[in-house]
Image: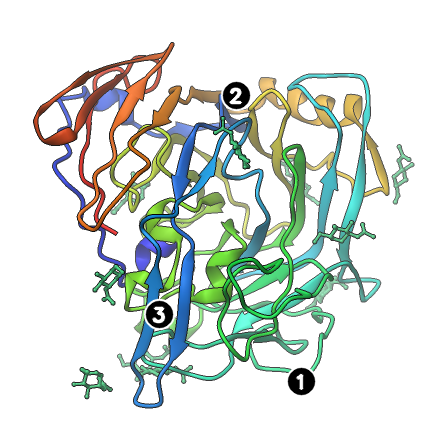
Amino acid sequence: MISSTLFTILSSLVIQVASDDSSKYSSEASFVQFDQLGFSGRYFPVTEVEALSDGNCTCSKDLDNPLIFNGTNSPFNEELSVHLRGPMNLRKFAWYVADEYEYGSTSGSWTRAAYYDSEAGTADNVTFLGNVGANNTCLGNALNYVSEDGVTEASESTVLGNITVPSNEEFAIYSGTKCSDPSSLDGDCGVYRDGIDAYHGFPGTVKAFLFEFWSPSDLSEESLKNKTWNYDMPGIWLLNAEIPRTAQYPLNGNCSAWNTGAGEFDIFEVMNVTERNHFYTTIHDYQGIEDLGTGIEMYAYLERTPESVMRGGLVLGSDGTATVFLSNSTTFNETIDSSDLSSWISSLKGEDGGEHSQELPSITLGALESTSGSSSTATGSSSSSSSKSKGGAAVVQASNWLSSVLFILGAMVL
Ligand SMILES: *[C@@H]1O[C@H](CO)[C@@H](O)[C@H](O)[C@H]1NC(C)=O
Ligand SMILES: *[C@@H]1O[C@H](CO)[C@@H](O)[C@H](O)[C@H]1NC(C)=O
Ligand SMILES: *[C@@H]1O[C@H](CO)[C@@H](O)[C@H](O)[C@H]1NC(C)=O
Ligand SMILES: *[C@@H]1O[C@H](CO)[C@@H](O)[C@H](O)[C@H]1NC(C)=O
Ligand SMILES: *[C@@H]1O[C@H](CO)[C@@H](O)[C@H](O)[C@H]1NC(C)=O
Ligand SMILES: *[C@@H]1O[C@H](CO)[C@@H](O)[C@H](O)[C@H]1NC(C)=O
Ligand SMILES: *[C@@H]1O[C@H](CO)[C@@H](O)[C@H](O)[C@H]1NC(C)=O
Ligand SMILES: *[C@@H]1O[C@H](CO)[C@@H](O)[C@H](O)[C@H]1NC(C)=O
Ligand SMILES: *[C@@H]1O[C@H](CO)[C@@H](O)[C@H](O)[C@H]1NC(C)=O
Ligand SMILES: CC(=O)N[C@H]1CO[C@H](CO)[C@@H](O)[C@@H]1O
């Protein structure tokens, strides 16, 4: 999603050793899964963000103080915000948590901790926001409440109506918990832009985001004229919740932690109009790649059915599995037995395309001390091998991921 913005990822050399095209050929799947999500890494939170009256802005990051993360599903174990792009009629949304869930598990259960139901007109622990507030050339529009229509500013938290947000428009979902501290590095929400409606995202290592939505084809004349820009390209994705609180689409890369790997998980994303009915899944973090803009792609898609309502979502397990599925069996009850969740997914194995999975490499981003012009080196572990090369960069071969792709993790330009 962010890759369609003005962010320029100045990355060092990436060598793609002639991988045979067939390994990248995308075919239909009934569900997709990343295994071994999470690694030892770090990103740089924004330490200052300020809109200036002339449209400029001042932003900084402290390159001496990375935020270090590690463990299962990291950095997606951090608080996440949820984003939806039109054409999108969101009918239900829920965030579930569980103590433990391994892929396929039949014991235990999930608890619903946030829920929006369009038909009932209710939103529990859900706040609808969008980039609709004060405009600044450098930072974009501030993150504020949206009204029933999902795209214009409201003065207070408002439940989304039964609306279809059009092509190229988007809105965000945060929890119902307001940030209690003012913007500050030590505050409960870190540093954020002045004047936004600042809320917490959805935390937890083991969590699931479920959606019931309708994404009708955009056949409007107006949009047809502009079909090059997000025309009929719906999407549902997650961001590290601190990203939109500073700036989701800034011109100055120092205004967002995104380009340092804070994390974006694209659940269902139409990438272009040619494949307008194919939902792709992509992870934008540094778990084994250098080119954050392209991200870690799943070479398989789920079918978008514009004429009918879809149900499904993303499940992050305690075993490091990230499973994306669409199934009409999906329900939104207050509790969901793990056995039910597992059966929704396993029954898709026999559907068109079946399961597509990809194991992510074990990665440890080292050299955490950084000065300006910093470099980070990677050291491989079990599923990767690495060797030092000149200039402090390391060459990593990810054996279980795309075996034929060599990555050079070199200087990371912040
Ligand atoms: C932004 O800052 C630059 C350099 O300080 C200045 O030249 C420019 O006029 C300012 N305003 C805008 C809108 O770019
Ligand atoms: C793992 O990350 C946590 C923060 O999430 C940090 O407190 C801890 O020191 C880290 N542990 C290691 C071994 O890096
Ligand atoms: C609402 O969401 C927050 C996460 O920001 C969570 O801590 C809290 O437990 C949730 N509230 C309920 C009632 O589940
Ligand atoms: C929303 O409105 C459409 C008609 O525009 C209707 O078909 C649909 O059932 C409504 N959805 C809900 C959840 O009420
Ligand atoms: C915000 O300002 C920029 C630059 O002036 C402009 O291109 C953009 O259309 C404005 N956005 C809104 C929603 O007003
Ligand atoms: C971004 O931050 C770095 C380090 O603080 C600084 O050197 C650089 O000039 C900043 N870039 C912009 C565009 O402000
Ligand atoms: C559309 O996106 C898919 C998925 O990224 C890609 O494989 C395909 O080449 C793209 N098609 C065009 C015409 O850009
Ligand atoms: C889901 O149900 C709808 C009817 O509500 C149907 O049109 C659609 O084909 C079903 N999708 C799948 C994947 O079975
Ligand atoms: C879940 O809720 C649906 C309707 O909302 C109900 O029909 C079904 O029995 C519930 N399932 C369980 C397992 O409680
Ligand atoms: C809805 C929309 O974005 N419309 C734009 C389509 O493109 C023309 C010119 O290219 C603009 O004038 C419209 O505002």
- For disc 2, the marked residue is 354
Q: Nearer the viewer, mark 2 or mark 1?
A: 1
| Res. 155 mark | 1
In this view, which residue lies farthest toward the left? 390
Check whether the beta carbons of the residues at disc 1 and disc 3 lie within 8 A of each other.
Answer: no
Query: Is 104 in front, or is 239?
Result: 239
* In the displayed structure image, the side of residue 323 where residue 101 appears, left or right: right
Q: Which residue is mark 3?
A: 224
Name the N-terminal-most of marks 2 and 1: 1
What amino acid type should be assigned to the residue bearing mark 2? Gly
Rendered residue at 28%/26% (across/down): 378
What's the amino acid at mark 1? Ser
Q: Quadrant of the image for the N terminus?
A: bottom left
Q: Residue at x 70, y 80 (%)?
A: 156
Where is residue 3 shown, x and y percent of the image? 32, 53
Q: Is residue 312 left or right of residue 48?
A: right
Q: Residues within 10 Å of mark 2 (few under 14, many from 20)?
A: some
The part of the image, by quadrant, that contains residue 345 is: top right
User: Which one is closest to the eye, mark 1 or mark 3?
Assistant: 1
x, y percentage for residue 162?
70, 68
Residue situated furthest top in the rendering? 382
Q: Could one spot residue 137 in this view of the protein? A: yes
